[in-house]
Amino acid sequence: MAENLIATLAVTARDTLSAAAGMGGGPFSSAGPVHAATVTIDDDADTPSQVSLLRPATAHEALIQVSAPAEGRVRQTLCLRFVDAHGPGKHQDLLMAASADGAPAHHLALPASLAGGGLYSTLWLYLAGVRPILFGVRHTPRPGSDGAHTVRPGDTLDLLACGPVAPFRRIGTIAVGTQDDGPVTFSARNSGGGLRPLPPVVFYRSR
């Protein structure tokens, strides 16, 4: 048990450091099916008015990828693309790793075995207008599933946001559609419209 705990802590430290330094694009995997999706921002979402993508009561075509099912100490990641968010071919990508809620936990890239509640975090900050913000996704498996945090057509996930020291709050939903033909490479440099990734987020990419 002690050996497993030490190994788990070592993996958490390694992946968190990788994310904090942006080393090698961070701990983000491109392994896993890509699905079409629709992101809908809640009517009452508390979002920065300077970011058109996050305006309440708007809907956006998207792609979502959750890395292949993970067990034990293996990391799990989620990538979300708002397709053509800033014009044809100009996407908005959000890359997230399994994490936890509240500061400083939402800065930790946790092994799948420790990431309770299917929560994913961008780990570090964006500027949304002038407001520092993190994004997250919460995925609660449907009743009768095997508990793995994979996505299937018909699933609905919560899109989350928070300030640097605040807990996540819901700002919208992600409705998962049919599987899309891949592969897709996600990069945090795909951004705009008043939303700007700060270091180390700007270095994130899937691989």
Image: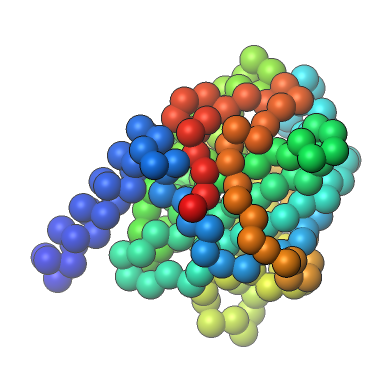
Query: Vertically, is 132 above or below 57?
Result: above
* Residue 162 at least partly seen: no
| Percent of width and height locating residue 144 | 62, 84
- Residue 58 location, quadrant: top right
Closer-to-camera residue (27/134):
27
* Residue 151 at least partly seen: yes
Placement of the N terminus among the 4 image quadrants: bottom left
- Residue 33 location, quadrant: bottom right
Residue depicted at x 77% and y 61%: 36
Residue depicted at x 79% and y 22%: 49
| Percent of width and height locating residue 164 | 49, 28
| Left or right of 11 in this view: 185 | right
Residue depicted at x 60% and y 47%: 186
In the image as oriented, which residue stretches furthest toward the left? 2
Closer-to-camera residue (50/172):
50
Label count reads 0
Closer-to-camera residue (109/29):
29
Residue depicted at x 65% and y 42%: 93
| Percent of width and height locating residue 56 | 84, 36
Query: Vertically, is 108 above or below 65?
Result: above
- Residue 23 location, quadrant: top left
In the image as oriented, which residue stretches furthest toward the top? 130
